[in-house]
Image: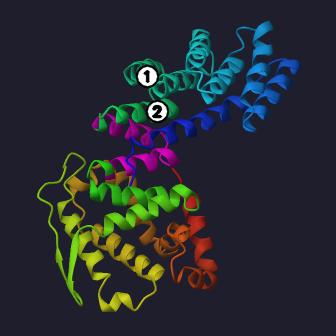
Amino acid sequence: MPTLRQTVWIVVLFLGSLLSTPVHCQETAPEAATETLRRGIDRFQAGDFEAAIELFSSILETSPDHEVALYERALSYYSTQSYDACLADAKAGIALKGEHEAQLYAIGGSCLSSDGKGKKAVKFFRKGLDRYPEDTSILLNIAVSLSQQGESATARTHLKALLRVEPEHPSGNFYLAALFEEEGYRIPATYQYLRFLSIESSSQRSAAAATAFLRLLNIGFEKTGNDEFSLLIPQSQPMDEGDFSGINLLVSFLAASATTEDYQELAEAPRIAKVIDSLIALTEERKSTELQDTFVWQHAISRLVAMRQAEVLEPFSYLAFSTLDLDGGDAWFAAHTDAIKSYQKWNAKHLF
C-alpha cells in the first residue's frame, strides 16, 4: 500500500477544486467582470488552464485588486505548476485582507508545498491559521505538509482540529484514517475508516477505505488448522490516541472467528456485516471513561454505536463495502430497499 506521504499530492489537488467552490459562488463584481470570471472558471474546469489564466489576467489588467480573480488565477497557475506565479497572486490577494483571505493562504501554502518547499509551506499555513484557526482548507493542507516532513503527531492534531470544526469533512476523515494506519494505530484506523465510509461510500476512496478496513481486520491472527487459529499479540502499540489494546485483541478474535465454519457458510458481504455488528456490540460493552474521552471514541465509535442502537448498522455495512462487489451484496440490496432508506434517512438526520 502506498503511504500517505507517497500519495500526498492527491490531497493538494483535491483541495484545489474544493477551494474554488465557495469563491465561485460569492463573486459580486460588476457584470462584465462577472461574465469574464465565469468564462475563466468554465475554462479552468475544462482543463484549459492557459485560457483561464488569460481571462483572469484580463480582469486584473483593469482591476488589479480583484480578489477573486487573483485567487482563481493563482489556482490556475498552481494547475500548470507555475508555483512562483501562484504564490505571487496568493500574496497579492492576502494583502487585500478580503473575505477570501483564508482560501488564499491555503492555495499559497499549497504552491510552496508542491514546489518542494515544505518548511516554508508550513510557516505560510501557520500564518493563515493565526488569522483563521478553524479554516478547514488550511488545516487539511498543513496536515499534509507536516506528514510529508515526518511530523505525523502534529499532522494528526490538525486533522482532528479540522474534524471538530467539520465532522463530516470527507477528506479530513479519509486522511486521518490513512495516517492512523500508516503510523501503526490499528484500532483507531479501523474505526476511522468506517467513520469515513459513513460519509462517502461509493467513490474510489471508498473502495480504498473498505479494502484498508479488511486489511487491518486480518492482521492480528494466524490460522493453524480447520477452525483453529492463534492470536498475534503485538509487542508494542502507540497509546497516545488511547489504550485500545483490549479492543485490539477483540478485533483479532472476531477476524479469526470469521474464518471458522459457522461464518464461512455465509457469503462474503453478510459475513463482513456480521463481523462489524459483533465488533460494535462488543466495543460498546468495553467502553470506559478513559476510552470515551478519546477523539476516536467521540468522533468515530460513538457514531457506529448509535447506528447499532438505531438498528441501521446492517444497511450501513452493506453500503460501506458495496464498491468491492462482494458476494451476497446484490441479493441483500434487492431484498432490503426499505432498510437502505431507513439508514439514509437516519444518517441524514445525524450529520453534525
Magenta-colored span: 153-181
Element class at badge 1:
helix
Pick out the residue farthest to the right: 32
Q: Amino acid at mark 1?
A: Ala
Q: Residue 141 has which mark?
A: 2
Quarter of the figure that contains the N terminus: bottom left
Q: Quadrant of residue 52?
A: top right
Q: Residue 160 in magenta? A: yes
For the point 29% across and 75% down, the residue is 255
Viewed as shown, does residue 62 lie left or right of 84? right
Image spot of residue 19 (x, y percent): 61, 32
Q: Residue 349 in magenta? A: no
Image spot of residue 72 (x, y percent): 68, 24
Q: Residue 121 has which mark?
A: 1
Pick out the residue farthest to the left: 235
- Estimate the spatial distance between the alpha carbons at disc 2 and disc 1, rounded to whole Å: 9 Å
Image spot of residue 140 (x, y percent): 46, 36
Q: Are marks 2 and 1 in contact (CB under 8 Å)?
A: yes
Q: Earlier in the sequence, mark 2 or mark 1?
A: 1
Q: Residue 283 has which mark?
A: none
Q: Main secondary structure of the magenta part?
A: helix
Which residue is at the front of the view, 46 or 239?
46
Q: Quadrant of residue 125?
A: top left
Element class at badge 2:
helix
For the point 48% across and 76% down, the residue is 314
Viewed as shown, does residue 172 lie left or right of 44? left
For the point 41% across and 81% down, the residue is 271
**Up-down: is 224 above or below 323?**
below
